[in-house]
Image (spheres, rainbow, N blue to C red):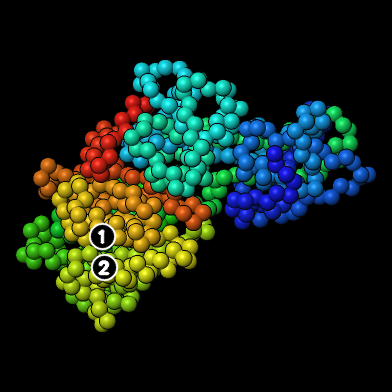
Amino acid sequence: MYSLGKKNRRKNFYRLSNFIVLVLISSFLLSCSPSIEQDNEVLITPSHTLAAPTSTPVSIPKLMIGKEVPKDIAEYVISALEGQVQLTEDEETVSLFIRAGTQNPVANWIYALAVPFPTVMDGISEQKLRAIWTGKVYDDLSGTLLKMDEETLRVFTAIWGKPAENSILIDNEISDTEYEVDFDQQALYLIPFGDIKPQWKILKINEQSPIQKEFDPFSYPLTVSFNIQSFSGEEDDANFPIQSSSIFTNRDSSKLTDIMLTGVTALVRGTALVMEQKGVLYPGEDIRSQTRAVDFMHVNNEVPFTIDCPYPELNSKKGLVFCSDTRYYDLLEDIGTDIIEVSGDHFSDYGVEGAFYTLNLYDQKKTPYYGGGRNAEDARQPLLLEHNGNKIAMLGCNGKNNKYYAPADENTPGAILCDFDWLESDIAQLKSEGYVVIVTFQHVEYYSYEAQPILVEDFGHAAAAGADIVSGSQSHQAHGFAFQNGAFIHYGLGNLFFDQYKYCAGSVCDYGFMDRHIIYEGRHINTEIIPIRFIDMARPRLMTLEEKEVFLDIIFNASNWAIEDYSLEKK
């Protein structure tokens, strides 16, 4: 039983302080009033408050809350209508009813369909999802169950009807912040958007997913609308204030931020030769639609730019001493680069002059950098980002414990060596200030899918210190994943732009990742991993479904996770 005046105990800042409902009170108004156009945007600051009645005093309408209405919506409406209605559970006297309904909604509640993170399939059709609900058996759906809490079950029973007896698993702990996703259980999880966690993969339904920026809630099958309906025959109820300016929701696009992390970029040697032959922008043509779409695009550019960088050679006499022509910066701009990591081994290949020239170029282009700098103090500074109310801090360092690769000191520019006393202190401070903390490492390059012990130790150290995301920028061969201390860990993403096409044994360096991390209301809620494959020494493309299935099977097994082999629709 809800009580009037009860304050919303969840995210009070998120609640509109003056919620106003649009409801037709009498059956006459229901049949005769013109439709009122709804504003689809969620209004963060209401422009007005409830209007006071102007006619003679009337009886207070009695409001009943449907059993399917989520607790957050019920508390929100009750608080907003304090003094305007009287709660009742008596159907004989009720005049207003909050329930699932699409006409003139006062709330849109977004749900997600989730599977354990080590899953290959990307989506399912609404038809097949509903088939699971009703217990209809398809060969490719055999044994698949839907898992949800009781509140979610009540919601979808109201709109889809009663589910088949053996198709649903109830787990009321799903919404707990410490809930551990069982990677060994084959089930689809139906969860409210606010309960999304990094350990899940969010599936598309009819090509729509609520973690996507282009998400359209009005065409998405798991958007559930709630409205206030009139069941009263009392004429006096028509004097109840009728105004509307907002729709309450648990997914507000103005509170979402995404950031793309990538692996090795080195515009040198064979990569640079291809750029000279096919154009500076050529390497990014197959991925730019992905990289441009995110709010923050990260590039780990390991190599300095120089004025007089010689024309590239596949087998340079200088060996592993690298530079990039300044013209190549156009590629970074073309793919939408917002952040540059400079913790790489080759950042100081052209000495102090090359490092300063490169940092000056980044400053001129207004592209912030981290993981290195003009001196040690500059190099240790976190890169701080704010977007849509989300605060993100990025820290980076070189974990090889070798001053040759990371020479930054009091007077010398370059990459900064990892110092865990510094990292622990900064991570703790940034977390206390409300930042989502991302730590990226330049580290030892191992040619294996499995993360080697030194990577596990150092990445785990950052996670234990409180980092939310720990990512390996260093690897040429992609590594596996882990979840530790609540952190998402990717030990190595592989190359983004580097000339190791067909170079590594078994062509393992031809494959890599771009990781899109989603931040919502100040927390990391999910990661979309985007596998890529090189077609030559310069250009990656997105993997086909068949390529991705093979690659992810390898990576998930290297992470000591058995791949979730759902035989559902893979598209």
Q: Which mark is residue 490?
A: none
Query: What residue is shown at x 80% (from left), y 48% (from top)?
Result: 83
**Residue 354 position within the rendered picture, expressed as x and y whole percent measured from the top left:** 22, 73
**Which of the pair 66/438 is nearer the observer?**
66
**Residue 506 position within the rendered picture, expressed as x and y whole percent measured from the top left:** 12, 42
Compared with 421, 560 (above or below) is: above
Query: What residue is shown at x 59% (from left), y 30% (from top)?
Result: 154
The CA distance from mark 2 to mark 1 is 9 Å
**Which of the pair 326/169 is nearer the observer?**
169
Q: Identify residue for label 2.
A: 418
The reply to whether dot 2 and dot 1 touch (C-beta < 8 Å) is yes
In the drawing, does residue 7 fall left or right of residue 287?
right
| N-terminal-most mark, 2 or 1 | 2
**Residue 198 position within the rendered picture, expressed as x and y whole percent measured from the top left:** 40, 46
Kind of element beneath mark 1: helix
Compared with 129, 278 (above or below) is: below
Residue 159 placement: quadrant: top right
Q: Identify residue for label 1.
A: 458
Residue 138 placement: quadrant: top left
Compared with 508, 353 (above or below) is: below
**Residue 176 position within the rendered picture, expressed as x and y whole percent measured from the top left:** 49, 45
Residue 482 in sight: yes
In the drawing, does residue 43 fall left or right of residue 552?
right
Query: What residue is shown at x 81% (from left), y 27% (from top)?
Result: 92
Q: Which quadrant of the rendered structure holds the N terminus?
A: top right
Kind of element beneath mark 2: loop
Residue 320 placement: quadrant: bottom left
**Furthest residue in direction bottom, as rendered:** 411
The amino acid type found where label 2 is placed reads Cys
